[in-house]
Image (cartoon, helix red, strand yellow):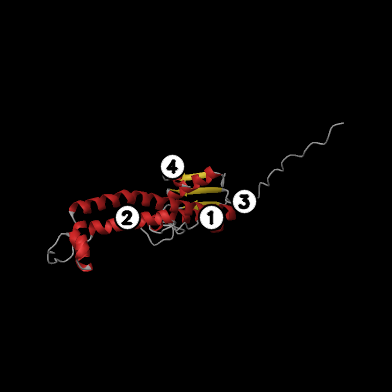
Amino acid sequence: FEPPRSPGPVPADPGQSPAPLRVLFATGIESGPRDSKGALLSGEFGSAHVLVPDMRVGLARVWRENAPIRRALLPRNLPHALRLLFALLALALATAPPLPALPAPPMEPASALLAGSPLLSAACCYRVLRRPIARALALVAAAAMLPGLAREGVAAAFAASFEVQRAAVLSFAPDVAVGSSWGGAVLLALRESGDFSGPLVLCGPAPMAILRLLP
């Protein structure tokens, strides 16, 4: 007695057209839903089968919600807020214009702090801080802080873009994902995290070093 064999896969109807692919397109950092590449994909696969999420990023368009510069200047926690405040104060000290000439005080700054008026004391302190060496130190301090703030801004922008694309993957369930530049790096991060395991088509993805910015 032989058990009944499985009928096997049902052959596809030659006259039936295959189901259209669902395509997710992740744009570059300066692009958006109206990107020309997204329009090309919509024309090829149909607008109902192509999703182009808006990551709201941009290097030049700093007003966008997830722009790296805006994220860098938006305090997220106390350490970041203190670094930002210190960098801005150092920049202000290094680049502030000189005060109008004041009559020279008849005493040294230290004596003025002890015996002079508040206005005279403030003027003396400012004159001391305005010395070239103080301005140079302030400029160096600001320059040392800005790269870290810029890195935090890029990391926050990338993390926000990652969340936008992950939500799109969960809701749209694409068959294939296409990424350009910044979007390509975001899709690679989705692959690394296991949130998307389908085929990827990457067009000049951003450097893999960006993936290390994720928390």
Question: Looking at the rendering, in which quadrant would you find the N terminus?
Answer: top right
Specify which label sits upstream in the sequence, 1 or 4.
1
**Residue matched to label 4:** 208
Q: Where's residue 78, x and y in %?
A: 42, 56
Among the 4 quarters of the image, the one containing residue 115:
bottom left
Furthest-top residue in view? 1
Q: Of helix, strand and loop, which one carries label 3?
A: loop
Q: Where's residue 121, x and y in %?
A: 21, 64
Q: Mark 3: which amino acid? A: Ala
Q: Residue at x 42, y 42 (%)?
A: 209
**Residue matched to label 2:** 87
Q: Of helix, strand and loop, which one carries label 2?
A: helix
Q: CA distance from mark 1 to mark 4?
A: 26 Å
Among the 4 quarters of the image, the one containing residue 36:
bottom left
Q: Name above or below for residue 152 compared with residue 117.
A: above
Q: CA distance from mark 2 to mark 3?
A: 56 Å
Closer to us: mark 4 or mark 3?
Answer: 4
Q: CA distance from mark 2 to mark 1?
A: 44 Å
**Residue matched to label 3:** 19
Q: CA distance from mark 2 to mark 4?
A: 29 Å
| Residue 175 visible in the snapshot | yes
Q: Mark 2: which amino acid? A: Ala
Specify which label sits upstream in the sequence, 2 or 1.
1
Q: Mark 1: which amino acid? A: Val
Q: Of helix, strand and loop, which one carries label 4?
A: helix
Specify which label sits upstream in the sequence, 1 or 3.
3
Q: Residue at x 58, y 53 (%)?
A: 170
Q: Of helix, strand and loop, which one carries label 1?
A: strand
Q: CA distance from mark 1 to mark 3?
A: 13 Å
Q: Where's residue 176, x and y in %?
A: 55, 47
Q: Where's residue 120, x and y in %?
A: 19, 66
